[in-house]
Image (cartoon, rainbow, N blue to C red):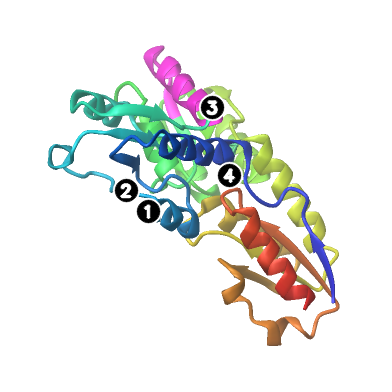
């Protein structure tokens, strides 16, 4: 079996930075250490940190029931309110929010203060989008996910709108939605806040998927960028499989293919990618 592994598979800059920050805090020996929500969307990485004594503060928890300690903010970021609440309760904050996400926080804060309506292209339930919403001043915002949402969106003609995107959104789809909004006669500032890591990964995944007989996408169940990779690969290659680890591989299904491509989401550790690759080469 011929296996082609994507060069962009695995940790992106922001995820590597967040994981390194947790390891640095563990190395200090200070306790207790928490992460606000899962530090990244990968169950294996989160469980590994739990074994080393790092607990998760579930979203919306009662902070007063916890012993104050170090809290590492996840790479997806949190709202201003959550940061302020943690500080007020005496937690020491280590901010692992990816700098590309922080850039969106600063943009929505600035433009909402200047009277712009904020339009976010992304998944309204995703932690990154919830964090972004939490930096908008006021309530003038909406989240759109698809063409239908963009077509149904309406404000007074001439309104000022700032459009940003969840960092992991599909670049082409973002552009399509921006064009639909621009045609409605608003004063639009569209900021392409999709990070390069995502774009490059998506482009390479699509290219490999178009050349192979089957494609494997490795990622966490809750990882938005991994799910998007799956969708992109599925468009180019109908035999696309989503796995979290090598245990999910169906080798009987894969053995009928001559050439298999592998890519992985930005929160997938290298050792899991290598295990999947080795399994396919057996
Ligand atoms: S995908 Fe991009 S924005 Fe998200 S954590 Fe990685 S580098 Fe940061």
N-terminal label among 3 and 1: 1
Q: Is residue 243 above or below residue 188?
A: below
* Left or right relative to 32: residue 217: right
Q: Quadrant of the N terminus?
A: bottom right
Q: Residue 67 sits in which quadrant? A: top left
* Distance Cα–Cα, label 2 vs label 3: 24 Å
Give the residue at x 62% y 30%: 192
- Asked whether the residues under the numbered discs 4 and 3 touch, taking CB atoms below 8 Å apart as contact, a structural biologist would say no
> At which x and y percent is residue 74?
42, 39
Does ligand 1 reach within 8 Å of label 2's beta carbon? no
Reply above or below: 111 against 216: above
Circle 3 sits on which residue?
99
Mark 4 or mark 1: name the one nearer the start of the chain.
Answer: 1
Marks 2 and 1 in Cβ contact (< 8 Å): yes
* Side of 3 relative to 21 (left or right): right
Name the spot of residue 199 as percent of width and height, x first. 69, 42
- Residue assigned mark 4: 169
Q: Which mark is residue 55?
A: 2
Relative to 92, 236 lies left or right? right
Q: Is residue 152 visible?
A: yes
Please state which of residues 26 and 243 is positioned toward the viewer in this rendering: 26
Residue 158 shows in the view: no
Density class for disc 3 (Cα within 10 Å; few <14, some 14-19, many ≥20) is some
Q: Residue at x 51, y 44 (%)?
A: 151
Could you tell me residue 130's position as x and y percent? Answer: 37, 39
Specify whether tag 3 is near ligand 1 (CB below 8 Å). yes
The residue segment tinted magenta is 100-118
Q: Nearer the viewer, mark 4 or mark 1?
A: 1
Residue that carries the numbered disc 1 in the rendered image: 50
Mark 2 crowdedness (10 Å alpha carbons): few <14, some 14-19, many ≥20: some
SS class, disc 3: helix
């Amino acid at each position: 079996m011929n296996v082609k592994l994507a060069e962009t598979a695995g940790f992106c800059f922001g995820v590597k930075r967040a994981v390194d920050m947790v390891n640095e805090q563990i190395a200090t020996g200070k306790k207790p250490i928490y992460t606000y929500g899962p530090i990244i969307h990968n169950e294996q990485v989160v469980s590994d940190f739990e074994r080393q004594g790092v607990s998760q503060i579930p979203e919306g928890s009662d902070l007063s029931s916890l012993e104050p300690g170090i809290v590492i903010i996840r790479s997806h970021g949190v709202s201003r309110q959550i940061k302020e609440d943690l500080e007020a309760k005496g937690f020491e904050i280590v901010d692992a929010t990816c700098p590309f996400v922080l850039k969106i926080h600063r943009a929505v804060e600035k433009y909402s203060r200047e009277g712009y309506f904020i339009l976010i292209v992304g998944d309204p339930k995703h932690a990154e989008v919830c964090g972004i919403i939490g930096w908008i001043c006021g309530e003038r915002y909406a989240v759109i996910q698809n063409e239908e949402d963009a077509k149904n969106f309406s404000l007074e003609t001439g309104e000022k709108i700032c459009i940003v995107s969840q960092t992991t959104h599909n670049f082409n789809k973002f552009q399509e939605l921006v064009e639909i909004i621009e045609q409605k006669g608003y004063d639009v500032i569209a900021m392409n806040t999709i990070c390069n890591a995502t774009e490059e990964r998506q482009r390479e995944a699509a290219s490999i998927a178009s050349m192979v007989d089957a494609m494997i996408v490795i990622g966490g169940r809750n990882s938005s960028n991994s799910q998007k990779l799956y969708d992109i690969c599925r468009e180019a290659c109908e035999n696309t499989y989503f796995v979290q680890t090598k245990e999910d591989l169906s080798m009987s299904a894969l053995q009928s293919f001559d050439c298999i491509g592998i890519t992985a989401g930005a929160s997938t550790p290298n050792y899991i990618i290598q295990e999947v690759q080795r399994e396919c080469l057996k």
